[in-house]
Image (cartoon, rainbow, N blue to C red):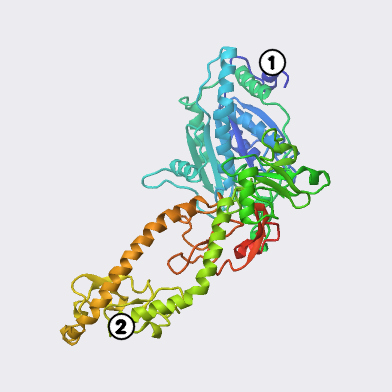
Amino acid sequence: VTDESDFINRLGCSKEDTFKVVAIFGNTGDGKSHTLNQTFFGGYEVFKTSTSQSSCTLGVWCALNRQHKVLLMDTEGLLGSSSNENQRTRLLLKVLAISDIVIYRTRAERLHTDMFVFLSNASQAYLKHFKQELRFASQKYGISESDLGPTLLVFHETVYTEVLGDKKDISADGILRQMFKSKENPVDAFPKICYVGTKTVKPPTDFSRLQLCADAQIQDTSVRAARKPEIIFRSLKALNDKFSQKIETPQLNTFPDQYFTCTSRCLACRARCTLSMNHESEVESHDAGQDKLCEYQSGYGNKVFMCKNCLRNKKRVIVVPKTSCSADNSWMGFTKYIWSGYVYECSNCGVIYRSRQHWYGNEDEEKVLHVEFRHVWPQGPSALDGTHNAARKIIDSFHFLADTVSSVGARPTKYLSEWTADKINPSYWMPNSEITECAKCRQTFDCTEQKHHCRACGKGFCSVCSSRKRPVPERGWGIEPVRVCDACYEKSDTGTAIHKETAAEQGDLTARRVGEVVTTTFSAMASALDYPLGVIKNSAKPAYWVPDEEAKECWVCRRIFGPRLAIHHCRACGQGVCEDCSPNKRAVPLRGWDYPVRVCKKCEKKTDKI
């Protein structure tokens, strides 16, 4: 069709005639052409039908029905064999935009998802693109156009299943609209949705209900009014001129990579990992592909430095800012750090940069370093741009000295303190020398763990199994709550017989009470000193370490931290781990630890360099 006159001549109508546009859509082979012939032409084959496997309708075909005063458009079927599916879909959406009534023909036992998706996408395309363009066309040609979208008529044919029917409080049309809403497929562009269902137990198909519904919508002018053929042509031409650029041919893939690849995404650039699912079990780090470059985010510290000299020799050696080189000990390195600043040390070239090597005129670090931005994966290492751990190294040195002294003197000191305590303990208390395990949980006491006595039964317990308090007047402890085990806590009263029997033991309690007052005083002083020491330790932690208050459980075994399970930090990942899950040591040069330090079992198994 070349122009308006050619369009009118081919239809065989005059310029003053007015028509409504009725277009039919649906999957290939569902009988769209046959439906138009039976509904509007009494079964006469105006639109070509075929029994062959190849599609008989390519593109868009038009025919005029003078009796109903409608312009019918038969479209190419969806899901059919096409050289460019996107181009075909765009053509169908243009036809849908200029239509007054849209018939969607489906022959299936149940309404398929592709129908809901296609009509929803068509609705969104109409509201976003076609509606505004049709308004511009009406202003350009001085014609009156309705802002409302077309009426949607769904013709559903089944053989075995029942079609949608009216219920007590809702019609079949309302049920269909609810189905669109429940599937999160909005169809706001269609002001009216009609459902026509027919069950064909024995051919031929009954089109009578479709004819009645179509006639009613053709006569209804509340949504769209009849238009002249030149207006219909101009509207279609305006859309075709606007949206006519070449579209890429889609590459269909039945099983896309998203089904099988890892779902992790980079926290900095949102790039997706290209490796297979659950690849972490194979001790393999995430990978976004060589073509996916990351962007720098200061919050994640995903900037790494490489030695330029090694990079020229095709070696990728990562260097990090450190307080000292690997040849210096902690104290010597800390002294040099105060005087000369931090250093960059390459495993091949040695120290390649010092921040304050000279009093003035120090060269820029970018002359010897190459900067690269790395991906940051969930539950992966953070702060890749290096962390200054000088303070932590000093504290570790103090800890090493203190642990050495305490490990040598812990056992004799423990024996002396327990012997002294037994001398002032009440006679009904079990001696400390006989207590080797908790009387309830049966956990063995080590040389540093404190043993606690239940004031009621006198047996030895750990701190967890004797954390409750209640008055024990029957043992001479008065009405103030004192430490008891869980079993004795449940016994609120042990009787007066014990009280009479133990009345002579009041003298034994005096020495113990005095000892507890002295112990409590020294414990309060120790707690007052522990607080500033804790602040110093927290401030000395590297930036990538997880704070103690956030580490509730071991990163490896998931055991809850508590008095019996101390928190340690892996020098590679910075997570909180227990001592059993971090028994070995390994150098972590990427974190500035050139000598063997504590690492967890997860980081110890990594094949890549840490």
Which of discs 1 and 2 lies nearer the camera? The answer is 2
- Residues packed near mark 1 inside 10 Å, few (<14), some (14 to 19) or many (20 plus): some
Instruction: Using the rendered view, name the quadrant where residue 232 is placed.
Output: top right
| 350 relative to 388 in the view: left or right | right
Q: Provide residue 530's location: percent of width, then percent of height.
A: 41, 58
Whether pointer 1 and pointer 2 mark residues with C-beta atoms closer than 8 Å, the reply is: no
Q: Which mark is residue 429?
A: 2
**Along the line of sight, which residue is nearer the eye, 333 or 427?**
333
Q: Amino acid at mark 2?
A: Trp
Q: Provide residue 331's location: percent of width, then percent of height.
A: 61, 54
Tell me the quadrant of the picture where the C terminus can be found: bottom right
Residue at x-position 72% and y-position 37%: 366
Instruction: Using the rendered view, name the quadrant where residue 606 is placed.
Output: bottom right
**Along the line of sight, which residue is nearer the eye, 260 or 104?**
260
> Quick one: SS at disc 1?
helix
Q: Provide residue 557's location: percent of width, then percent of height.
A: 53, 67
Q: Amino acid at mark 1?
A: Ser
Identify whether 302 is placed above or below 502.
Answer: above
Name the residue beneath numbered marker 1.
5
| 113 relative to 321 in the view: left or right | left
**Along the line of sight, which residue is nearer the eye, 352 or 554?**
352
- Residues packed near mark 2 inside 10 Å, few (<14), some (14 to 19) or many (20 plus): some
Q: Earlier in the sequence, mark 1 or mark 2?
A: 1
Measure how far apart labels 1 and 2 are at the Cα level: 114 Å
**Along the line of sight, which residue is nearer the eye, 30 or 193?**
193
